């Protein structure tokens, strides 16, 4: 005889009550963000969430805690256009930078007057009579402290894709795009013009005739460069290869300039007035690498009478050729083509004189 509905109801209530108690015990409501993160990670461990879903959920939670300053492109790395430049120069800069939007300034980089879309340049090329100023889009300025969740909502509501970040004094501090904000949620978004920030820092470009040439971004960290080339450049005072070269010269390297820091040779491919961007790098000839020595070694050579193969001291009298060179505390460079020894040594200049008392 089947159970009556009235007899099965108490058992069902007891069963539901037990299920509710177990659910409340195992799936308790989180009281703070730490507990919520713990629940999410437990769900990931039980394969209820995959790694991508967990990462995106955590990204959504974090955007409310991150400010624009934390992820913006710093002012020094911004690609900006000067409205006073000829159109041909602007087109060339846009092609080299491969961005779709550019802040445009007038007189100085703190006076941003608008945003130029790269596609709008096609209209200028088609009709040279058009004024570039008429095609600029309004620029949005935001403070460094603005939270990303608020910024993302503003981007969506106002249909903007780019904002210029200003500091407390009103000076341009950096640049942020809607892509930068979304990447905090979904991870890096790469297009056909992006290259990996680490794997493509150093790229082999040519190998032949006994020479191997690399293309190196100036923002490559020295530690990565040392690991790739087996060098031992110092990392205490600067972090990037560009900083190393600027410190060595005492100024920003210029385009086309060649700098030798044993055992490597650097040629500047791209640079502006503020920083170097791209370098061509190869190794110095083997003779230069094997000619390393200490400062004492070169001073001893100079004291032996030098001749045509020795290094004459400034104002010395040991030969008819007098070269002026700088020597670091680990080595130096010599006259008449003798290879230098250290990363800190490079030839400053040379003069030829028959006088034995040349002075500089």
Image (tube, rainbow, N blue to C red):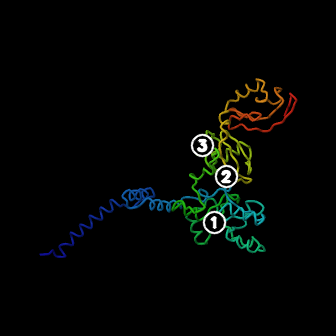
Which one is in front in this view, the residue at disc 1 or the one at disc 3?
A: 3
Question: Vertical placement of 247 versus 316: above or below?
Answer: below
Q: Where on the picture, by quarter, is residue 93?
A: bottom right
Which secondary structure lies at badge 1? strand
Question: Vertical placement of 88 versus 45: above or below?
Answer: below
Instruction: Give percent across and percent down for residue 338.
Output: 73, 34
- State the quadrant of the N terminus: bottom left
Q: Residues within 10 Å of mark 1 (few under 14, many from 20)?
A: many
Instruction: In the rendered structure, find residue 282 and report the number of the disc placed on it.
Output: none
Q: Is residue 312 left or right of residue 41?
A: right
Q: Residues within 10 Å of mark 2 (few under 14, many from 20)?
A: many
Q: Where on the picture, by quarter, is residue 69?
A: bottom right
Instruction: Give percent across and percent down for residue 328.
Output: 71, 34
Q: Residues within 10 Å of mark 3 (few under 14, many from 20)?
A: few
Which secondary structure lies at badge 2? strand
Q: Is residue 270 left or right of residue 27?
A: right
Q: Which residue is mark 2?
A: 278
Q: Where on the picture, by quarter, is residue 166?
A: bottom right
Q: Which residue is mark 1?
A: 162
Q: Earlier in the sequence, mark 3 or mark 2?
A: 3
Question: Vertical placement of 60 versus 267: above or below?
Answer: below
Q: Nearer the viewer, residue 305 or 252?
A: 305
Q: Which residue is mark 3?
A: 229
- Report the Cα–Cα distance between label 2 and label 1: 26 Å
Q: Nearer the viewer, residue 93 or 179?
A: 93
């Amino acid at each position: 005889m089947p159970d009556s509905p009235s007899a099965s109801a108490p058992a069902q209530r007891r069963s539901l009550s037990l299920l509710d108690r177990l659910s409340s015990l195992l799936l308790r409501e989180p009281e703070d963000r730490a507990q919520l993160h713990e629940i999410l990670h437990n769900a990931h461990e039980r394969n209820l969430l995959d790694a991508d879903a967990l990462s995106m959920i955590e990204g959504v939670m974090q955007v409310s805690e991150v400010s624009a300053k934390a992820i913006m492109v710093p002012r020094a790395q911004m690609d900006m256009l000067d409205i006073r430049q000829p159109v041909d120069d602007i087109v060339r800069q846009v092609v080299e930078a491969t961005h779709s939007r550019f802040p445009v300034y007038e007189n100085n980089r703190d006076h941003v007057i608008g945003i130029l879309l790269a596609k709008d340049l096609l209209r200028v090329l088609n009709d040279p009579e058009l004024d570039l100023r008429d095609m600029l889009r309004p620029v949005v300025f935001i403070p460094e402290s603005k939270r990303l969740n608020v910024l993302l909502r503003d981007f969506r509501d106002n249909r903007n894709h780019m904002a210029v970040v200003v500091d407390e004094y009103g000076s341009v501090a950096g640049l942020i795009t809607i892509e930068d904000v979304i990447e905090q949620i979904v991870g890096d978004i790469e297009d056909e013009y992006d290259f990996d920030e680490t794997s493509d820092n150093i790229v082999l470009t040519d190998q032949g005739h006994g020479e191997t040439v690399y293309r190196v971004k100036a923002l490559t960290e020295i530690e990565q460069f040392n690991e790739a080339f087996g060098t031992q450049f110092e990392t205490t005072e600067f972090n990037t290869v560009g900083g190393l070269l600027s410190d060595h010269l005492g100024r920003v390297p210029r385009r086309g300039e060649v700098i030798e820091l044993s055992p490597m040779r650097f040629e500047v491919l791209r640079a502006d007035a503020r920083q170097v961007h791209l370098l061509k790098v190869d190794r110095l000839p083997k003779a230069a690498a094997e000619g390393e020595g200490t400062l004492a070694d070169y001073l001893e050579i100079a004291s032996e009478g030098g001749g045509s193969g020795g290094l004459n001291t400034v104002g010395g009298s040991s030969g008819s050729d007098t070269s002026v060179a700088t020597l670091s505390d680990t080595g130096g460079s010599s006259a008449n083509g003798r290879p230098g020894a250290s990363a800190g040594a490079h030839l400053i200049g040379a003069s030829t004189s028959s006088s034995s008392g040349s002075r500089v």
